[in-house]
Amino acid sequence: MEMNIQNLLLLAVIGATAGFLSGLMGLGGAVIIIPALVFFLGYTQQQAQGTTLGLMVLPIGFLAAWSYYQAGNIDIKAVAIMAVTFFIAGYFGGKMATTIDTSLMRKIFSVALILIAIKMFFQK
């Protein structure tokens, strides 16, 4: 992926959005980052999965990420940008989540999952 200013900003927005939603609803890698990398930056499914694993390598799966890295399916620069913004925005999402009613949180989570599933299902 070319690292122009537009792509750098998009990666930062993806990282921040995933971090915020992770703190807010427990959504993050598989539900937010992977589809965003595929839809907005044209990553292959494997590149998106590998890059997301690279972002979450220590807490989730070093060995799985290593396999993707060896196959050339991790974008290290994208990992670094999203990791920083994910970390910071996750704090704010977590703070907000503690102020939202449980029933409303469940509805927000459900709508997010449905919209993502519909988009992925109908994409060619």
Image: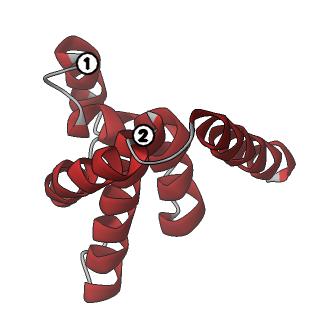
Name the mark nearer the viewer: 1 or 2. Answer: 2
Mark 1 to mark 2 CA distance (whole Å) = 12 Å
Residue density around tag 2, few if under 14, some if 14–19, many if 20 or more, within 10 Å: many
Residue 4 percent coordinates (x, y): 26, 84
Q: Is residue 98 left or right of residue 83?
A: right
Residue density around tag 1, few if under 14, some if 14–19, many if 20 or more, within 10 Å: few
The color scheme shown is secondary structure
Residue 78 vs 99, above or below: the answer is below
- Quadrant in the picture for the N terminus: bottom left
Q: Amino acid at mark 1?
A: Ile
Q: Residue at x 42, y 40 (%)?
A: 28
Q: Nearest the camera: 99 or 60? A: 99
Q: Nearest the camera: 90 or 98? A: 98
Q: Amino acid at mark 2?
A: Gly
Residue 113 falls in image quadrant:
top right
Residue 88 percent coordinates (x, y): 17, 56
Q: Earlier in the sequence, mark 1 or mark 2?
A: 2
Residue 105 vs 21, above or below: the answer is above
Residue 59 in sight from this viewpoint: yes
**Residue picked out by circle 1:** 60
Residue 3 vs 83, above or below: the answer is below
Secondary structure under tag 1 reads: loop
**Residue picked out by circle 2:** 28
Q: Nearest the camera: 68 or 116? A: 116
Q: Residue furthest right?
A: 122
Q: Is residue 52 left or right of residue 38?
A: left
